[in-house]
Amino acid sequence: MQACSESQHPSERLAPFAIPSAADPVLNDFLHRSSDLLCRWIGSAERTGPVPLMRPLPEVAPGLEGAGVESLLSDLQQVMDGAYQPSHPGALAHLDPPPLTASIAAEMVCAGLNNNLLAEELSPGLTGLEHDLCRWFCHRIGLPEGSGGVLASGGTLSNLMALVSARAALGSMQRDPVLLCSQDTHVSINKAARVMGLSEDALQTISVAPDGGLCLDALGERLTTLQAQGRPCLAVVATAGTTVRGAIDPLSDLAALCRDAGVWLHVDAAIGGVFALSTSHASLMRGMELADSITLNPQKLLGITKASSLLLLRDRTHLRQAFSTGLPYMQAPNGVDHGGEIGLQGTRPAEILKLWLGLRQLGEAGIEATLSGALQRRKAFASMLDPNKLTLLSGDLHLLAFQAREGGIDAAACWSEETRQMLLSHGYMLSRPFYGDRFCLKAVLGNPHTTAQHLSDLSDRLNASLA
């Protein structure tokens, strides 16, 4: 297909595939115009709301003839008009912060490279980059030599791969194993148990202490009971940042307990793990470095575009033991392993690029500022809420859940729903999780665009809702 010249109007001649012999002016124009749309959409966040009022429905099926540039740009605009807006200062409902600007660019380059992390020959430079950056994370956390990891498309998959690795390490002779976790563990652990085909009673939950962390005494008693029954424990799952409260399990004590019992310890640090990168706040994650496996999601606070999750293992060879099947149709790697041999995913895009470039953009100072800012906003917001009207659910991270102090279960359901809708009408989006025996409201204070003025206005409205 012949390329058009610079003088031709590019909107008429967008080729399905960019020409490989020179810079494609048509693609260049299309990408520039697409990025203009995106920048305008991000830049208009404060003039709309976190959730769009209208959700346009673009055409789904392809037409008989390929669409031109103008039509494609119109399609993109419709999708943007109906999208959730994480850059809005009132977007405080979930662990979905605004994206880092460098990570946005890296996402585009990743798509253009279209490399495949399945095998080294399909992503020669990027395979090495993934190995090296995982080792850097291991070093910063404090894992020993021989540790390493792999990227995955989300914490659910990272947790699943960790538990598959634990089962492989346990050995095939161990039948009907049990998986222990706290009652506040993320739902992905339940999914993992189902996918792995564990028995119906394999996933056993342990009560939490008043601070939201897993109760050590109860865990110790359960391990003793399992040993007496002759039933193996596949793994203990600790959580470093529970979904509602942001609570952290007692990681150091759990590691000691698991070491004495000879049990694999997995830490789901999808929410809190990045705090180990901070010199000021690394103590929050103390003991995480003693785990056998760790899930860590930079997308949840550092602004790495989705999806960005890492699975890190104390002994990297467990990944090969669990997932290697051989790739006879590929050349042997020059490095450590093919990417498809150390995880559940085969074909993988080069998601390492947006994580690496995002961290390069932030630098040590930017990482520190992002993490400290989130904790400071949480502390400030908590101090603004009226303790006579609201009960705060304690936690150590940048999440703050709270319930109406007075009233029963039905009153809590009514207040939380009506208040959430009222706040949405004023541009604030909080989530409404069910915790314990009732609904509560939750704010995630990881949005750097949320100012002290926003928090003051939000807290005033919350306090007034219970007048």
Image (cartoon, helix red, strand yellow):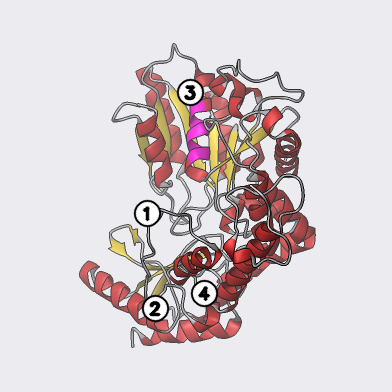
Q: Position of residue 246 (x, y in %)?
A: 50, 57
Q: Residue at x 41, y 31 (%)?
A: 179
Does the magenta-highlighted stretch encompass residue 219? no
Callout 4, which amino acid? Ala
Quadrant where the C terminus sits is bottom left
Of circles 1 and 2, which is in front?
Answer: 1
Tags 3 and 1 in contact by the CB under 8 Å rule?
A: no
Crowd around label 1: few <14 · some 14–19 · many ≥20 (10 Å): few
Which residue in the structure is indicated by mark 3?
167
Q: Residue at x 39, y 80 (%)?
A: 423
Q: CA distance from mark 4 to mark 3?
A: 42 Å
Crowd around label 3: few <14 · some 14–19 · many ≥20 (10 Å): some
Crowd around label 4: few <14 · some 14–19 · many ≥20 (10 Å): some
> Image quarter for residue 313?
top right
Which residue in the structure is indicated by mark 1?
61
On the question of residue 412 being in view, the answer is yes
Of circles 4 and 3, which is in front?
Answer: 3
Q: Disc 2 on helix, strand or loop? A: helix
Question: N-terminal of the two: label 3 or label 2?
Answer: 3
Question: N-terminal of the two: label 3 or label 1?
Answer: 1
On the question of residue 218 being in view, the answer is no
Q: CA distance from mark 1 to mark 2?
A: 33 Å
Say which mark, if any, is on residue 424: 2
Question: N-terminal of the two: label 2 or label 4?
Answer: 4
Q: Residue at x 47, y 65 (%)?
A: 75
Q: Disc 3 on helix, strand or loop? A: helix
Provide the residue span drawn in magenta.
Answer: 157-164
Q: CA distance from mark 2 to mark 4?
A: 20 Å
